[in-house]
Amino acid sequence: STAIMRGTSRMRLPELAKSIGDSEAPMPLSQPDLFLPDPEPGLFEEPVPYGERPDPAKIRLQLVSLIETARNAKAMPWPEREARMWQIAFPQMTNWLPPEEGDQLRFEFAQEMQRLAKAA
């Protein structure tokens, strides 16, 4: 056991980690932990201050404007990528409105998007 201790006491940290096995080596600080639920919540966006919610009136105005843009168009008014983005973002934005109103706006937007897809 002294021979083992003498041998390990002379090893440098990286060599010691390799001798123990990579599974027990400490994770480098630059490597994110894939098992954390949300390691960097504000990495790509500014956090909304606690208690501050989006203004439903502004959300409503933007959603109605998008529906009107689609309704007044004979062909898809947005490039393909932007149209796909609105198909994802629009339903999410309606979550800031009362449920019945959100349901109605989602329905109207989906109808217009289907009509425009058929026109293409």
Image: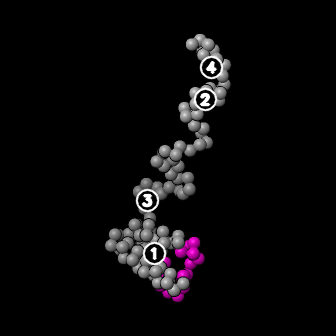
Disc 1 to disc 2, C-alpha distance = 56 Å
Disc nearer the start of the sequence (2/3): 2
The residue indicated by pointer 4 is 8
- Disc 1 to disc 2: CB gap under 8 Å: no
The residue indicated by pointer 2 is 17
**Badge 2: residue crowd in 10 Å (few <14, some 14–19, many ≥20):** some
Camera-side mark, 4 or 3? 4
Q: Kindly state the secondary structure of the residue where label 2 is placed.
A: helix
Residue at position x 41%, y 79% in the image: 108
Disc nearer the start of the sequence (3/1): 3
Residue 50 shows which numbered tag?
A: none
Quarter placement of the N terminus: top right
Disc nearer the start of the sequence (2/4): 4
Q: Kindly state the secondary structure of the residue where label 4 is placed.
A: helix
Specify start and end residues of the magenta stretch as a single range.
Answer: 63-83
Query: Could you say where residue 82 lies in the image, as x and y percent from the top left?
Result: 56, 73
The residue indicated by pointer 3 is 52
Residue at position x 42%, y 62% in the image: 53
Q: Amino acid at mark 3?
A: Glu
Query: Could you say where residue 94 lies in the image, as x and y percent from the top left?
Result: 41, 70
Disc nearer the start of the sequence (4/3): 4
Q: Amino acid at mark 2?
A: Ala
Q: Amino acid at mark 1?
A: Leu
Disc 3 to disc 1, C-alpha distance = 20 Å
Is residue 30 rendered to the left or right of residue 48?
A: right
Disc 2 to disc 4, C-alpha distance = 11 Å
**Badge 3: residue crowd in 10 Å (few <14, some 14–19, many ≥20):** few
* On screen, residue 11 above or below 105: above
The residue indicated by pointer 1 is 63
Look at the image and tell me whether residue 58 can be seen. Answer: no
